Amino acid sequence: MTEMADVVAAAVLGVPGVAELNAGMFGEVGTYLPGRRVAGIRLGDDVTEVHVSLVFGAPVRETAARIREVVGTITKGPVDVTVEDVVAPTAP
């Protein structure tokens, strides 16, 4: 069975400019599931939090807006996006 956190994570990772999900400086952001954890996604009753690392050069505001848009079609309520880091692009 696919968990909501997995669906949100896959959608976020599909947004151009997103390098990876990021659990935060101290690893505090995540959703705990039986036997594992989905880092960078926190599903709350009132808000969904998404923490990401972006690829260097990706437009921050536009990428965050796209994440909000995509996640908003999956979850209810507001979506808070935090850009934790910017990373170098990987070689093709």
Image (cartoon, rainbow, N blue to C red):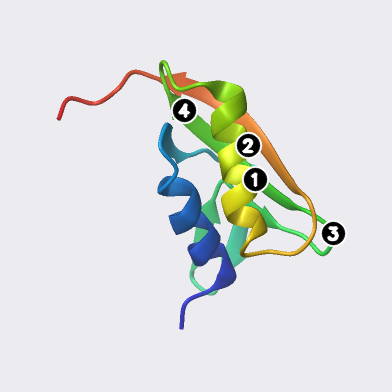
To which residue does mark 1 refer?
A: 68
Q: Nearer the viewer, residue 85 or 17?
A: 17
- Relative placement, left or right, of 35 versus 76 is left
- Say if mark 1 contacts mark 2, CB within 8 Å: yes
**Quick one: quadrant of the C terminus?**
top left
To which residue does mark 2 refer?
A: 65
Tell me what residue is drawn at x 67 percent, y 56 percent: 72
- Residue 83 drawn at (x, y percent): 60, 28
- Say if mark 3 contacts mark 1, CB within 8 Å: no
Disc 3: CA contacts within 10 A as few (<14), some (14-19) or many (>=20): few
Disc 4: CA contacts within 10 A as few (<14), some (14-19) or many (>=20): many
Determine whether 86 is above or below 78 in the image.
above
**Res. 74 in view:** yes
- Residue 45 drawn at (x, y percent): 82, 64
Q: Secondary structure at mark 2?
A: helix
- Relative placement, left or right, of 84 versus 15 is right
Q: Amino acid at mark 3?
A: Asp
Mark 3–mark 4 distance (CA, rounded to whole Å):
25 Å
To which residue does mark 4 refer?
A: 54
